[in-house]
Image: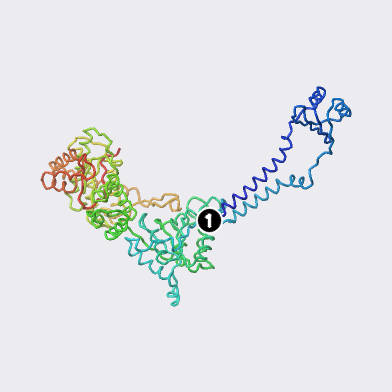
């Protein structure tokens, strides 16, 4: 703020000086109206001139009506006599000359002004004002949080207990460095946090500083990159200089892959701004001068693109993986976010955690927020379980598009399509149970079949993959059997099924005829310089065998899905009828249909009176959705 006021004052002074000089030149010209000499002679002859003051060749006079004028006279020896004859009062003064000081000032002022402006801009570019000047390129943009402004602790971080244990010794070192130094131990200079987006890497870094009560410098990797070469390196130097003054402290660099990508790779040159910035960062972390008491924590979800020099011991020599939370971690995260929301007694975090596999901490925060928004729209005082169910449906399946008016034939086609997915999924033993089926348009899909896993899963076996492929074919087969037609709605199903079959053969070694080998071409990233040209690793004959094996898998699972649908036509008819009547059915109604009973009516919706909509029991949403038709 002080630098801003200072800059404004300097520009104000410059503007005032310019205005003064311009006014000084313009005042003399605008004070008196100019008059041509011939007109002046005519005015004298007609007796309209009252008084004249002669200053060299300049005549300044006053007319009879009081108006003033000025003119310039040539060499006219009879002018004075003519004025006397006309009765004009004549006054004579020596010609006014500007002072020597004024002449020097006028002649040198433009040059002095340019020199002053140049000095001002040079000081700003060299960091004359920290962070306040418009041209302070070389100054770090890191934002510092001290122990009073950073109130985040480990209690605010949930779902990553192993990561918290791994970084807890950083807190002990920052609190008591002598405990490690007396035994010759050295704390890591850099810690790299790796994890999917939204898993809480930034929050965990803030919690380390909050627990240790030390300053926390936060900056993004993109803040180092500018169009001017050398600016990023200057900012790195300035950031570490500031950190050393506040040591012990933590520097947190978010999305470090923006500046830490491999050097000398890609299609561009090797002497660009980003590489110079990375070089300076490497030197500051482990160069001739160590940054004592400064711990650098970086976060990225692309560790594969980082430069190897950045990951060697002495720099980012410790990698902390922040994974997606398990069921216990999701429950703890939900408890953290529910503190800020008035929760109804029927909301149970453990039930919600069981039904949200694969969700990150940011996803769960969004779930709580969406539930609070649904409750606010209904003018509720508390957020109940129904709001959380509606929020899960919106996140997993997309927002409802009830304004879409589908023809009755297309609604029936969508109902049979989704019923085909659901029935095949319920009949196969290794597929996830169907949680909800809906023919309400959501997002880009005209219908959705949502399956939920009963537990967290980290891998899939061969039978699970094959049965999932069969489930994907259930929609198209139901259209053929019951509607005697084929629609474009199954395009995404076929795409996913083909991709899964191809990976089984080419990547996962799940083919009996081709065996446990990887069949494929190099898939390196061009911007990393890994695949500027494509190299084939397999022959044409082998690729033909791969295609034949993929076709065999697809045909086998397609035949399996058709057999199941033809053997259970009655169940699909009942399910399609229920969908056309209620638009959405839940897991309990699906169980009734599969057991041969009439499906129970849907539970009344607590928030909207019309029409009746699904109100799923607190059993948890699915992680896989099957779009019926794409708009």
Query: Is 620 positioned to the left or the right of 167 in the image?
Result: left
Asked whether, in this view, residue 248 is left or right of residue 380, the answer is right
Q: Mark 1 highlights which residue?
A: 232
Expressed as whole percent of the image width and height from the top left, the position of residue 104 reads 76, 47
Q: Nearer the viewer, residue 513 or 159?
A: 159
Q: Name the image quarter holding the N terminus.
A: bottom right
Instruction: Find the residue positioned furthest to the left.
Output: 597
- At 53% across and 63% down in the image, what residue appears? 241
Horizontal and vertical percent for residue 91?
A: 84, 34
Determine if residue 313 is in view: yes
Looking at the picture, does residue 172 appear above or below residue 606? below
The residue most toward the bottom is 182
On the image, the x and y values in percent for residue 123 come to 62, 54
**In the image, residue 574 lies at what x, y percent?**
14, 41
Identified at 50% across, 62% down, the residue is 282
Point out the residue furthest to the top here. Answer: 46
Mark 1 nearby-residue class (10 Å; few <14, some 14–19, many ≥20): many
Please state which of residues 288 and 158 is positioned toward the viewer in this rendering.
Answer: 158
Say which quadrant the C terminus sits in.
top left
- The answer to whether any part of residue 546 appears in the image is no
Q: What's the image's color scheme?
A: rainbow
Locate residue 144 relative to residue 587 in the image: left or right: right
Residue pictured at 23% horizontal, 36% vertical:
486
- Front-lying residue, 408 or 495: 408
Q: Is mark 1 on a helix, strand or loop?
A: helix
Relative to 7, is 499 on the left or the right? left
When asked about the image quadrant of residue 507, the answer is: bottom left
């Amino acid at each position: 703020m002080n630098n801003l006021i200072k800059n404004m004052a300097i520009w104000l002074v410059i503007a005032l000086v310019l205005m003064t000089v311009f006014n000084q030149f313009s005042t003399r010209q605008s004070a008196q109206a100019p008059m041509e000499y011939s007109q002046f002679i005519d005015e004298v002859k007609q007796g309209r001139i009252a008084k004249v003051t002669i200053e060299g060749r300049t005549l300044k006079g006053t007319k009879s009506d009081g108006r003033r004028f000025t003119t310039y006279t040539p060499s006219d020896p009879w002018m004075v006599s003519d004025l006397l004859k006309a009765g004009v009062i004549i006054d004579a003064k020596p010609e006014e000359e500007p002072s020597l000081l004024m002449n020097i000032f006028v002649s040198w002022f433009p040059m002095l002004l340019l020199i002053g402006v140049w000095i001002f801009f040079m000081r700003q570019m060299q960091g004359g004002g920290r962070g306040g000047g418009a041209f302070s390129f070389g100054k770090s943009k890191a934002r510092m949080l001290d122990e009073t402004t950073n109130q985040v602790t480990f209690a605010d971080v949930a779902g990553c207990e192993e990561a918290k244990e791994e970084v807890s010794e950083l807190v002990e070192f920052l609190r008591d460095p002598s405990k490690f130094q007396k035994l010759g131990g050295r704390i890591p200079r850099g810690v790299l946090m790796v994890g999917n987006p939204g898993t809480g890497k930034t929050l965990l870094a803030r919690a380390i500083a909050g627990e240790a009560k030390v300053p926390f410098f936060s900056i993004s990797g993109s803040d180092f990159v500018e169009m001017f070469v050398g600016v990023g390196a200057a900012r790195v130097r300035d950031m570490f200089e500031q950190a050393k003054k506040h040591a012990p402290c933590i520097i947190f660099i978010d999305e470090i892959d923006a500046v830490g990508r491999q050097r000398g790779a890609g299609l561009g040159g090797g002497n660009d701004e980003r590489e110079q910035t990375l070089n300076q960062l490497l030197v500051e972390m482990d160069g001739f001068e160590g940054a004592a008491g400064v711990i650098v924590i970086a976060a990225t979800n692309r560790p594969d693109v980082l430069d190897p020099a950045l990951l060697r011991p002495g720099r980012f020599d410790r990698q902390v993986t922040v994974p997606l939370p398990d069921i216990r971690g999701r429950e703890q995260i939900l408890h953290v976010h529910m503190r800020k929301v008035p929760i109804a007694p029927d909301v149970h975090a453990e039930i919600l955690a069981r039904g949200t596999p694969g969700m990150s901490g940011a996803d769960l925060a969004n779930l709580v927020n969406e539930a609070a928004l649904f409750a606010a729209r209904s003018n509720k005082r508390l957020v109940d379980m129904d709001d959380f169910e509606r929020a899960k449906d919106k996140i997993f399946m997309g927002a409802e598009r009830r304004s879409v008016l589908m023809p009755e034939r297309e609604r029936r086609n969508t109902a049979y399509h989704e019923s085909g997915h659901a029935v095949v999924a319920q009949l196969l033993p290794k597929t996830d149970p169907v949680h909800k089926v809906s023919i309400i348009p959501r997002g880009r899909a005209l219908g959705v079949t949502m399956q939920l896993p009963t537990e967290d899963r980290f891998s899939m076996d061969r039978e699970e993959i094959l049965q999932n492929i069969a489930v994907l074919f259930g929609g198209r087969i139901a259209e053929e059997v019951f509607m005697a037609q084929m629609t474009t709605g199954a395009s995404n199903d076929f795409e996913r099924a083909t991709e899964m079959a191809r990976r089984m053969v080419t990547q996962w070694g799940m083919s009996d005829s081709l065996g446990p080998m990887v069949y494929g071409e190099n898939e390196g990233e061009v911007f990393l310089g890994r695949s500027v040209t494509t190299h084939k690793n397999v022959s044409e004959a082998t690729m033909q065998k791969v295609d034949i094996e993929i076709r065999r898998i697809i045909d086998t699972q397609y035949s399996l899905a058709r057999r199941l649908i033809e053997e259970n036509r009655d169940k699909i008819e009942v399910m399609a009828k229920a969908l056309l009547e209620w638009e959405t059915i839940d897991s309990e109604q699906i169980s009734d249909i599969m057991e041969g009973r009439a499906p129970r009516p849907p539970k009344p919706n607590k928030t909207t009176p019309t029409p009746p909509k699904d109100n799923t029991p607190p059993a948890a949403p699915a992680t896989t959705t099957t779009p019926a038709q794409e708009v």
